[in-house]
Image: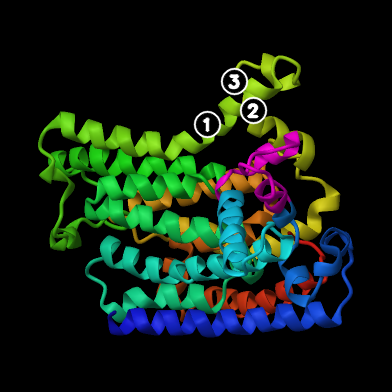
Amino acid sequence: MKKWEKEIIKTTIKCKAVHASIVLVASAILSSFDTSAEILLGSQTNALTRSILRWDVFHFLSRAMNSYGGWRSEHEIAFMPGIPLLMRGCGLVMAKIRDAHTLTLSDTLIASAFLANLISLLAPLELYRLTRVVYPHYTPAQAAAPALLMAACPPSPPSLLVPYTEAVYTPLALMTARMVAEGSWLTASLVAFAAASTRANGCLLAGFFLYEILIRPVLETRRLCFPPRIINVGSEHRLSRPTLSLTLPSQRIAFASLGTIASFAPLGYTQTEAYARLCPQAPFCTRTLPLAYSYVQGKYWDNGLLRYWNVSQIPNFLISLPVYVVGIVAICNPRITLRALPHYVLHTLTLILLLCFSNVQIALRFATALPPLWWWVAAHTDSRLARSFVAWSRLWGCVACVLWAAFLPPA
């Protein structure tokens, strides 16, 4: 492992230890605002298990305790099967180690939290590796700066400490993007499938395959001209594995199709299963596009176009405002090369979806999966906005740990 990779891992471990300590201490001292965890865990309740069992983990645990990790209630359709299956597997391994004959809640929670921490440890490391590929003219120190910032000040540390979607999706999504850019399309397809199995928006990873394999070769071949401030192709000649190595259109189409199918397959499966189990009785069955996902998101989480834009949600807008401000500034002041272009497109699309169609505070958790945000902050550490964002992230990260331990929003 190279020098900067070791430094990133060390920083990530140190920061995780600090955040985990805050959560555990707060969980031991504070009483839960909601006692659902204590009621469910019963005699298995302690500071550790209680601090893990919060918010979406309830839904994941419910599915994990099912024999095949499937959903029992329709609201659980909103959650992809990846995390529940991971939790169930971890619980079974722990039970095997303890020579137990039954799968317990505590075994499942503790073992899956341990694995989630190991996986999320890779997120800053993958951001570093991705930055090296996207901006090959960067020195190792320059490429490490965004990763070190992500490791030191994630806006939602608790979601990286427990079996949560962000803990698994973020490193896998970054890994997918890197592997696609490097030309490892088969492996990237497998990783994309795993990432999409944890978050529904993982289907958007298909865009990396379509762009890198089909679109970018056209842009390079035709030498399309872009404003110098936006597109800088000059540094890209240093990349050792150009997409154009696939000269046959049939090869490019085959790999692009494989990556797209892998990215959409988990969501497609869950929607097909939901349709088969709920239709024709469920209201969404008669819609032009009968998606159970959008139906349950709207019914149980009030998601939809601007449905979150009301007075009662002002606190959530204010809490997540720094992420949106820096995210938008990163778009307006980009460092876009042909390699970086798909990241900015996905970044923009994600912000629009979060701001207009979703619970806006989820941006706090999504921030670690938005490379352009960290690229901008690392490149503008001399600006007041970047320094303020780093200071806020560090402060809010600690506050979020306390709120998580007390079972208080934002989720």
68 part of magenta stretch: yes
Tell me which numbered mark, 3 or 1, is placed earlier along the sequence: 1
Q: Residue at x 70, y 30 (%)?
A: 295
Tell me which numbered mark, 3 or 2, is placed earlier along the sequence: 2
Is disc 2 surrounded by few (<14), some (14 to 19) or many (20+) residues within 10 Å? many
Please count the marks in the image: 3
| Residue, disc 2 | 274
Q: Secondary structure at mark 3?
A: loop
Q: CA distance from mark 3 to mark 1?
A: 15 Å
| Residue, disc 3 | 289
Q: Residue at x 66, y 17 (%)?
A: 287
30 part of magenta stretch: no
Q: Secondary structure at mark 1?
A: helix
| Residue, disc 1 | 269
Return the x and y of residue 76 as percentages of the image width and height: 70, 40
Q: Nearer the viewer, residue 31 or 286?
A: 31
Is disc 1 surrounded by few (<14), some (14 to 19) or many (20+) residues within 10 Å? few
Q: CA distance from mark 3 to mark 2?
A: 13 Å
Q: Where's the N terminus, which quadrant?
A: bottom left
Q: Nearer the viewer, residue 114 or 150?
A: 114
Q: Residue at x 53, y 79 (%)?
A: 152
Relative to 304, residue 388 above or below: below
Q: Which residues are magenta?
A: 59-82
Q: Residue at x 18, y 59 (%)?
A: 236
